[in-house]
Amino acid sequence: MNSNQLNDYRPRRSALYVPGHERRFIEKSRRLNADCIIFDLQESVPPAGKADARALLANELCNSDFGYSERIVRVNKLDSPWGMDDLKAIAALDIDAVLFPNIESKDELLRAIDALDQAGGSDKSVMANIESPMGVLRAEEISGCSQRLTTIVMGTSDLANSLRVNLTLDRQGLITYLSMCLLAARAHHKSIIDGPHFNLKDVVACEFSCRQARDLGFDGKAVIHPVQLTYTNDAMTPKREDVAKANAIIKAINQANSQGQSMAVIDDRIIEPSLEHWANRVLCLCNMVNEIGQSELLGPEKMR
């Protein structure tokens, strides 16, 4: 597998935002089933607490045991009073990636990567929040500007506010803009994570939002409270019927190829070679989920 393929297959079903100034939340996140943990120094931390949050997070991440979770730090905007100090504090920590907020152009992301390198973080991957109309319009150039970029993370609340869109249950007002960013990310083989669902008490709406994100094509969804992890991981995990279909497709394609044919037939339906990629992705994701012990796949109560 090349690097793009590895990026395609890494589980990023759930990305939990953890406030960087709350020690108890950081400690709790060590035991949670989140594919990604985003330690936030930006929106969740008040201005008066930025320096303390930076110091606390640097101390807490000296113990980098967060299970299988991908460890990410979201810094403040680099042109803010705190952004460069954030980079200096976290560049040498044992983390997987740095998330830059509200990226609006290729040049802005490249400058951010250069600043990270200058701070000593040249070994870190990067992620980019897209959360503004300009960011959406330039999503393609952002997605394609660097191999260091692994993932686009949508900031749907700020985007909706900027667009003056009402956030309805079906998010109809955002679908076009989400799809534009999905297209850009996929064109450059990047992962893409949907924005969070903010109503913690509405379980039905949360589950709907997770499954909508899956059906739109997102790799995962941001999470703002651990209670949402079950719904998010379940929505983004292949089900038993998906795995059975994937195995059948690969078997049929292999059999067709052995007979000198490129297409197969399953239950009177033509199976094109391109479906083999879908099947391999499903099986790889399933295997990775099983390896990390997050086997929602095998729970009969999850079979829908």
Image (cartoon, rainbow, N blue to C red):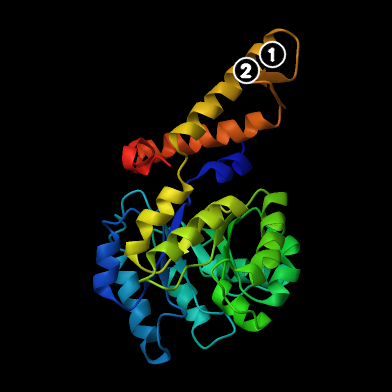
Amino acid carrying label 2: it is: Ala
Q: Is residue 291 above or below residue 262?
A: below
The residue singled out by tag 2 in the image is 252
Q: Is residue 224 above or below residue 269?
A: below
Q: Quadrant of the C terminus?
A: top left
Amino acid carrying label 1: it is: Ala
Q: In the drawing, does residue 220 fall left or right of residue 106? A: left
Residue drawn at (30%, 56%) of the image: 32
- Rendered image quadrant of residue 151: bottom right
Q: In the drawing, does residue 30 fall left or right of residue 277? A: left
Q: In the drawing, does residue 78 fall left or right of residue 196? A: right
Q: Residue 80 in the image: state x and y as whole percent.
A: 55, 86
Residue 256 numbered tag: 1
Residue 15 numbered tag: none
Tag 2 near tag 1, CB within 8 Å: yes
Q: Residue 140 in the image: state x and y as whole percent.
A: 74, 61
The span from disc 2 to disc 1 (Cα, nearest Å) is 6 Å
Q: Quadrant of the N terminus?
A: top right
Looking at the picture, tell me which residue is in the foreground, 157 or 200.
200
Number of dots carrying numbers: 2
Q: Residue 9 in the image: state x and y as whole percent.
A: 53, 41
Residue drawn at (69%, 67%) of the image: 177
